[in-house]
Image (cartoon, rainbow, N blue to C red):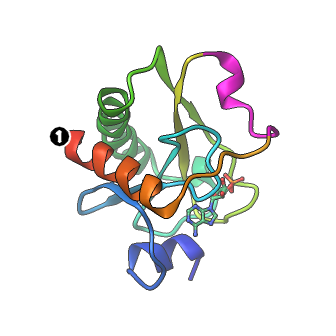
């Protein structure tokens, strides 16, 4: 069971941003920006590009809704999307509100927010999720 499956199962806490029957979105615990969110399929697959065409299409449709919620909660030029997956072997998409290209730099020192700020960030995205 991956750490993300444990999060989905509620065995490990997370700052939930959105959910439906197939996908789950929550704040990255080491954010590159305020509002940095991960989108994961509840079905456990390691490599993003091993997802079936149907599952990837459904994940993209869900991700669009999460990106819209992030942009509504945290006005930005655009929401950026990245797939890495080198650390956690459970397919996921990184979403982050962008004001400039450097906001999507994963090598930069990560941001630090209090648990209250993280909870507020997630609540704002969840509230905007349609
Ligand atoms: P990568 O697999 O390279 O896309 O990176 C995995 C991402 O998951 C990193 O940005 C981590 O900060 C994030 N991450 C790892 N564990 C957790 C967790 N328990 N809750 C939230 N985010 C996590």
Picture coordinates of residue 53, whole percent (x, y): 44, 44
Vertical position of residue 123 compared to residue 11: above or below = above
At 59% from the left edge and 76% from the top edge, which residue is drawn? Answer: 2
Image quarter (top left, top right, bottom left or bottom right) of the C terminus: top left
109 left or right of 45? right
Could you tell me residue 98's position as x and y percent?
Answer: 55, 23
69 sits left or right of 9 in the view: left
Check if residue 106 falls in the magenta segment: yes
Up/down of 58 relative to 116, above or below: above
The front one of 62 and 47 is 62
> What residue sits 29% from the left and 28% below the top?
72
Q: Quadrant of residue 23?
A: bottom left
Is 96 displayed left or right of 72 in the figure?
Answer: right
Q: In the current view of this chain or complex, which residue is farthest to the right?
A: 107
Q: Position of residue 30 (x, y in %)?
A: 65, 54
Q: Is residue 62 magenta?
A: no
Q: From the image, tell me which residue sits under label 1.
A: 130
Q: Quadrant of residue 104?
A: top right
Does 88 appear above or below 79?
A: below
Q: How many marks?
A: 1
Which sits in the foreground, 28 or 86? 28
- Mark 1 closeness class: few <14, some 14–19, many ≥20 residues within 10 Å: few
Question: On the rendered image, what quadrant is the N terminus found in?
Answer: bottom right
Where in the image, quadrant-wise, is ligand 1 located? bottom right
* Residue at 31 percent of width and 30 percent of height: 68
Q: Is residue 50 left or right of residue 61?
A: right
Residue range in magenta is: 100-108
Helix, strand or loop at label 1? It is loop
The residue positioned 40% from the left and 73% from the top of the image is 8
In the image, is the residue at mark 1 within 8 Å of ligand 1 by its beta carbon? no
Q: Position of residue 89 (x, y in %)?
A: 66, 65
């Amino acid at each position: 069971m991956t750490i993300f499956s444990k999060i989905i199962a509620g065995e490990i806490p997370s700052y939930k941003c959105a959910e439906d029957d197939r996908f789950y979105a929550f704040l990255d615990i080491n954010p590159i920006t305020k509002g940095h969110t991960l989108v994961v399929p509840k079905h456990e697959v390691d490599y993003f590009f091993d997802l079936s065409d149907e599952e990837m299409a459904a994940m993209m449709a869900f991700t669009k809704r999460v990106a819209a919620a992030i942009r509504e909660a945290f006005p930005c030029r655009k929401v950026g999307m990245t797939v890495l997956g080198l650390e956690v072997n459970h397919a996921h998409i990184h979403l982050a509100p962008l004001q400039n290209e450097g906001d999507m730099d994963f090598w930069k020192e990560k941001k630090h927010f209090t648990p209250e700020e993280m909870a507020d960030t997630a609540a704002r995205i969840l509230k905007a999720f349609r």
